[in-house]
Amino acid sequence: MPGKAQYARTPGQGTPAPAHGTDYDAEFLAERLHGRFTNFLTGDGRELIESRCRDALREHSTWLVHQITREVALALEAEMTDWVREAVDEELQRRRSA
């Protein structure tokens, strides 16, 4: 195994007898699994990942819109109160002057 000296085979070392009389090659199985993972991640797996990312992005965008709307509404509420107070004060001063 590349980069894993502890798993390296010594020359002439035979592979241990497989359990239950099955004949398999770990490297061959690993290559097949690698191929299957690669095919999955370039096909159905990629579609699944993209779909979940789109859903997460849509959900997060909706949350952001709600948060920003709430913050803007709170800021406008405070500003509106000040604007109304100023408009009333201006109107009262205008009426007193007239």
Image (cartoon, grey):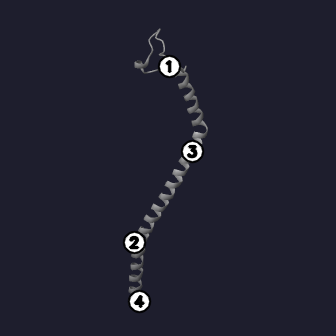
Task: Give the mark nearer the N terminus: 3 vs 1.
Answer: 1
Name the residue rendered at 41%, 89% in the picture.
95
Q: Residues within 10 Å of mark 2 (few under 14, many from 20)?
A: few
Task: Give the mark nearer the N terminus: 4 vs 3.
Answer: 3
Q: Amino acid at mark 2?
A: Ala
Name the residue rendered at 51%, 55% in the picture.
59
List the single residue furthest toward the front. 20
Tag 4–tag 2 contact (CB < 8 Å): no
Depicted 84 relative to depicted 23: above or below: below
Residue 20 location, x and y as percent? 51, 22
Tag 3–tag 1 contact (CB < 8 Å): no
Name the residue rendered at 42%, 72% in the picture.
77
Task: Give the mark nearer the N terminus: 4 vs 2.
Answer: 2
Q: Amino acid at mark 1?
A: Pro
Label 3, label 1: how far apart the Cα atoms are: 41 Å
Task: Give the mark nearer the N terminus: 1 vs 4.
Answer: 1
Residue underneath mark 4: 95
Q: Amino acid at mark 4?
A: Arg
Q: Nearer the viewer, mark 4 or mark 2?
A: 2
Residue underneath mark 2: 78
Q: Quadrant of the C terminus?
A: bottom left
Residue underneath mark 1: 18
Residue underneath mark 3: 50
Label 1, label 2: how far apart the Cα atoms are: 77 Å
Q: Nearer the viewer, mark 2 or mark 3?
A: 3
Label 4, label 3: how far apart the Cα atoms are: 65 Å
- Secondary structure type for disc 4: helix
